[in-house]
Image (tube, grey):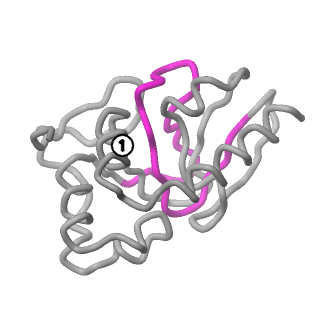
């Protein structure tokens, strides 16, 4: 079991909150539980996610990350954003298959992309090692990860 990480700047992510400036505690008001990716988690699992992630607000138009920058970065999004590929934006929202970006699954796909906020959004960074541990602990993410992977495979084929 990994220990909670100190929240700090994240390599390869733009706009990551420095220590002490992470997003509001979304467990207290249960808004994290209302985010589609986390809707099936128990309160204990939600707390584990909070302890092993970093969250911040991204302004409309903010560049968040790119596929080539940091393959260890798994990013979840709540708001509106677009994956930019070959100059063409592919918009997505909080309940779409592309509600996550990056990580080991996406690193295997060929093609350069970047992620840009299209509305004020929340960004949550989870290190790939922490995501792997969540999956080992039985966090119910497989369906959403598979839906997202199919979305990105199709996007990169076209």
Viewer-proximal residue among 17 and 38: 38
Q: Position of residue 82 (x, y in %)?
A: 67, 48
Where residue 139 sits, quadrant-wise, is: bottom left
| Main SS category, magenta section | strand
Horizontal side of 23 relative to 39 (left or right) equals: left
Horizontal side of 60 relative to 70 (left or right) equals: right
How many dots with numbers? 1
Where residue 83 sits, quadrant-wise, is: top right
Q: Residue at x 26, y 65 (%)?
A: 46
Dot 1 falls on a residue whose secondary structure is helix
Q: Examine the structure image and report whether residue 59 is included in the region drawn in magenta.
A: yes
Q: Residue at x 10, y 40 (%)?
A: 3
- Residue that carries the numbered disc 1 in the rendered image: 131
Horizontal side of 139 relative to 79 (left or right) equals: left
Q: Residue at x 26, y 58 (%)?
A: 23
Horizontal side of 58 relative to 54 (left or right) equals: right
Q: Position of residue 25 (x, y in %)?
A: 20, 66
Image quadrant containing the N terminus: top left
Q: Which residues are magenta?
A: 57-84
Binning the other alpha carbons within 10 Å of mark 1 as few (below 14), some (14 to 19) or many (20 upward) gives many
Q: Residue at x 27, y 46 (%)?
A: 54
């Amino acid at each position: 079991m990994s220990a909670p990480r100190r929240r700090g700047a994240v390599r390869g992510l733009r706009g990551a909150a420095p220590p002490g400036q992470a997003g509001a505690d979304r467990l207290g008001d249960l808004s994290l539980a209302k985010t589609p990716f986390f809707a099936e988690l128990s309160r204990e699992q939600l707390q584990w996610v909070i302890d092993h992630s970093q969250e911040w607000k991204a302004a409309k138009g903010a560049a968040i990350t790119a596929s080539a920058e940091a393959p260890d970065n798994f990013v979840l999004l709540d708001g509106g954003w677009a994956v930019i590929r070959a100059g063409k934006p592919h918009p997505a929202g909080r309940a779409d298959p592309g509600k996550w970006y990056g990580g080991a699954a996406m690193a295997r796909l060929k093609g350069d992309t970047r992620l840009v906020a299209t509305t004020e959004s929340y960004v949550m960074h989870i290190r790939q090692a922490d995501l792997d541990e969540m999956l080992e602990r039985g966090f119910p993410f497989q369906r959403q990860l598979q839906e997202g992977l199919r979305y990105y495979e199709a996007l990169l084929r076209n």
